[in-house]
Image (spheres, coloured by chain):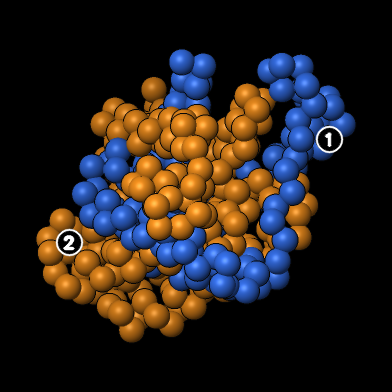
């Protein structure tokens, strides 16, 4: 049980993610998450507005169930498999974040400065949440995949579009982390 | 019911992402600040092992559950779509501290505010769908 409640090291998690990819392929499907966002649009009736969303969403049931499973996996972990210990971050990261106004970095999984429920009801807080999501959703579909579809599936099958997408992921992530986050907070 | 296996694989994936702290905003910040090897190890490790699986799919050593060869789908080509789309994705990834998989994990963690992020992501996918014919790829 010690192993279960401790955080898992990269050399445990990395190969396990590859096994998830293997299982999806074994059962005849690809490994990817962001296409579900389009399925949500289709279910919500977006097919009436654009032919792009005129699809049979029931054909994506397997993928929607994968997402439901991810939620359940998060629930099981947070309720039964967590030690409750803080995340062991680089002390430099913690002191930088403290300077930016993020108190108690690592004590929980996400900073309350962004994810507290009160933030939903403030203009700035809401704008950050919806804006960040918008960029993820728009960017992933424009690029043709997210971390699972491009970074893991695409890079491991040596596809050039995925290499370009991952270069983009990092360019965007570096710009946000180094230049924009200090301006926003 | 034949799809139930994908639900189970999802549960496993959700647990891996939780237990390895990939779903933590702080881990993403730390990664983009080059202050920890953790995330690079996870993504790099997943890619390395997947590379072996991909080779075994190609050679036909690993077959699917029906005993057929596993095709490796080609990604959509395009320099603009991948670089520009990828950069926009990266901006959002670093701000939200979560890519699409971890967003759903965080619902399970009881983080209510992540629902707004997912709403934004769905809206983003919707706007992309509307503009897809007009955007350069």
Which quadrant holds the C terminus of chain B? Answer: bottom right
Dividing the picture into quadrants, the one containing residue A160 is bottom right
Question: What residue is pinned by disc 1?
Answer: B58
Examine the rendered structure and indicate whether residue B110 appears above or below residue B134: above
* Mark 1 nearby-residue class (10 Å; few <14, some 14–19, many ≥20): some
Identify by letter the chain in orange: A
Judge left or right: residue A141 versus residue B25.
Answer: right
Q: Nearer the viewer, residue B101 or A137?
A: A137
Mark 2: which secondary structure? helix
Is A101 placed above or below A147 here?
Answer: below
Count residues near mark 2 (Cα–Cα under 10 Å), then give few for <14, some for 14-19, many for 20+.
many
Residue at 31% over, 51% down: A109
Q: Name the residue located 46 percent from the left edge and 57 percent from the top edge.
A: A50
Q: Are marks 2 and 1 in contact (CB under 8 Å)?
A: no
The subunit letter for the residue under badge 1 reads B
| Left or right: A82 as drawn, with respect to B78 | left
Residue at position x 22%, y 67% in the image: A126
Q: Is residue A160 visible in this depiction of the protein?
A: yes
Q: Is residue B13 above or below residue B32?
A: above
Residue B3 x %, y %:
50, 22
- Locate residue A146, reporting x and y percent: 54, 54
Q: Secondary structure at mark 1?
A: helix
- Residue placed most toward the observer, A56 or A118: A56
Q: Which chain is blue?
A: B
Q: Position of residue A108 (x, y in %)?
A: 27, 51
**Left/right of residue B12 with respect to residue B136 in the rendered view:** left
- Please give the count of numbered marks on the rendered protein: 2
Q: Nearer the viewer, residue B41 or B60?
A: B60
Q: Which residue is mark 2?
A: A120
Residue A137, position as x, y percentages in the image? 44, 59
CA distance for labels 2 and 1: 47 Å
């Amino acid at each position: 049980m010690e192993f279960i409640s401790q955080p898992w090291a990269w050399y445990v998690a990395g190969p396990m993610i590859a096994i998830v990819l293997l299982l999806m392929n074994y059962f005849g499907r690809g490994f990817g998450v962001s296409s579900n966002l389009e399925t949500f649009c289709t279910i919500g009736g977006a097919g009436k507005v654009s032919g792009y969303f005129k699809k049979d969403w029931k054909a994506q049931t397997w993928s929607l169930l994968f997402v439901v499973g991810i939620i359940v996996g998060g629930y099981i972990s947070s309720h039964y498999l967590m030690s409750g210990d803080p995340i062991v971050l680089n002390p430099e990261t913690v002191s930088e974040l403290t300077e930016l106004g993020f108190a108690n970095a690592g004590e929980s999984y996400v900073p309350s400065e962004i994810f507290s429920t009160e933030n939903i009801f403030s203009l700035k807080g809401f704008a950050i949440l919806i804006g960040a999501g918008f960029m993820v959703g728009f960017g992933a579909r424009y690029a043709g995949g997210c971390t699972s579809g491009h970074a893991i599936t695409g890079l491991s099958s040596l596809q050039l579009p995925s290499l370009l997408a991952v270069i983009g992921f990092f360019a965007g992530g570096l710009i946000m982390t180094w230049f924009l986050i200090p301006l926003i907070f | 019911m034949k799809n139930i296996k994908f639900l189970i694989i999802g549960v496993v994936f959700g647990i891996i992402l939780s237990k390895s702290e990939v779903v933590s905003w702080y881990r993403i910040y730390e990664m983009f600040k080059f202050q920890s090897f953790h995330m690079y190890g996870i993504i790099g490790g997943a890619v390395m092992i997947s590379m072996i699986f991909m080779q075994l799919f190609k050679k036909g050593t690993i077959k699917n559950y029906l005993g057929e060869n596993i095709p490796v789908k080609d990604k959509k080509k395009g320099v603009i779509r991948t670089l520009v789309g990828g950069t926009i994705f990266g901006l959002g990834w670093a701000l939200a501290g979560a890519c699409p998989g971890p967003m759903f994990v965080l619902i399970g963690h009881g983080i209510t505010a992540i629902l707004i992020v997912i709403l934004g992501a769905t809206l983003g996918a919707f706007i992309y769908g509307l503009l897809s014919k007009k955007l350069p790829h």
